Image: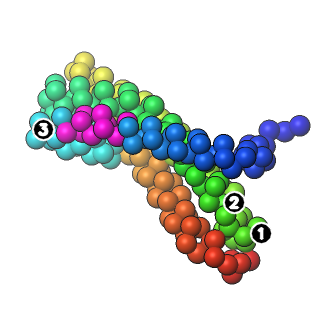
């Protein structure tokens, strides 16, 4: 019997999905506090937040940013990146379960229902790109601390992973807004 995660998710009772969505959402909100504290520490150095490093793309840009951060900003970036491995799980669980709950509110067989069967997995795929991005960010930060040259290819892959992550999350949010407003009202999407 082949593994079919979609059918397994279909069989999870809605109250269980709601519980996971609420718990993961609460964990996401709770973890946002320390994530923002690290972000403030980076910005307090006169440099930007972590997203600029995610999108640096080139060694010269990354060197400039890492220099502005100094040891305190780089330490905050490293701590935030390690914590992001837990943070990404919260949005992945909340996103998958929340999207599945919304999909169940759409009319069966509509475009909203069919697209929801795919879109519900986008947060997990985004989290996978986020994890890859984190590994590369940690490698960049470690190389900087050791005084080694920054890997240009790794910086470009980091930028691609970050862009893909944000695109997938934005896509799932847009679908969720549409499903919650238009998708639950009618069968026009057939």
Assign a secondary structure to mark 3.
helix
Whichever of callouts 3 and 2 sits on the residue coming sooner in the sequence is: 3
The secondary structure that most of the magenta stretch takes on is helix
| Residue 73 x/y as whole percent | 19, 31
The label nearer to you, 3 versus 2, is: 2
- Residue 44: image tag: 3
Q: Residue at x 45, y 37 (%)?
A: 27
Direction from residue 9 to residue 48 in the image, left or right: left
Q: How are the colours assigned in the image?
A: rainbow
The image quadrant of residue 58 is: top left
Question: Mark 2 = which residue?
Answer: 104
| Residue 86 x/y as whole percent | 45, 31
| Residue 119 x/y as whole percent | 61, 57
Direction from residue 3 to residue 113 in the image, left or right: left
- Give the farthest residue toward the top: 146
Q: Residue at x 16, y 27 (%)?
A: 72
- Specify whether residue 32 is in view: yes
Of residues 142 and 168, the one nearer the viewer is: 168
Total count of labels: 3
- Give the farthest residue toward the front: 15
Circle 2 residues within 10 Å: few <14, some 14–19, many ≥20? some
Q: Is residue 84 above or below residue 48?
A: above
Whichever of callouts 1 and 2 sits on the residue coming sooner in the sequence is: 2
Numbered range of the magenta stretch: 31-40
Q: Are marks 1 and 2 in contact (CB under 8 Å)?
A: no
Question: Mark 1 = which residue?
Answer: 109
């Amino acid at each position: 019997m082949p593994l079919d995660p979609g059918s397994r998710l279909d069989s999870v009772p809605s109250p269980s999905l709601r519980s996971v969505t609420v718990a993961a959402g609460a964990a996401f909100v709770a973890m946002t506090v320390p994530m923002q504290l690290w972000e403030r520490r980076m910005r307090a150095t006169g440099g930007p937040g972590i997203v600029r490093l995610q999108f640096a793309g080139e060694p010269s840009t990354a060197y400039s940013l890492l220099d502005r951060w100094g040891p305190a900003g780089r330490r905050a970036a490293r701590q935030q990146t390690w914590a992001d491995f837990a943070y990404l799980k919260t949005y992945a669980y909340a996103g998958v379960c929340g999207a599945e709950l919304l999909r169940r509110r759409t009319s069966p067989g509509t475009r909203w229902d069919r697209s929801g069967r795919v879109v519900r997995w986008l947060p997990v795929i985004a989290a996978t790109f986020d994890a890859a991005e984190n590994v590369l960010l940690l490698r960049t930060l470690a190389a900087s601390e050791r005084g080694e040259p920054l890997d240009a290819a790794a910086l470009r892959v980091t930028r691609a992973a970050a862009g893909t992550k944000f695109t997938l999350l934005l896509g799932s949010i847009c679908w969720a807004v549409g499903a919650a407003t238009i998708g639950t009202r009618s069968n026009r999407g057939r």
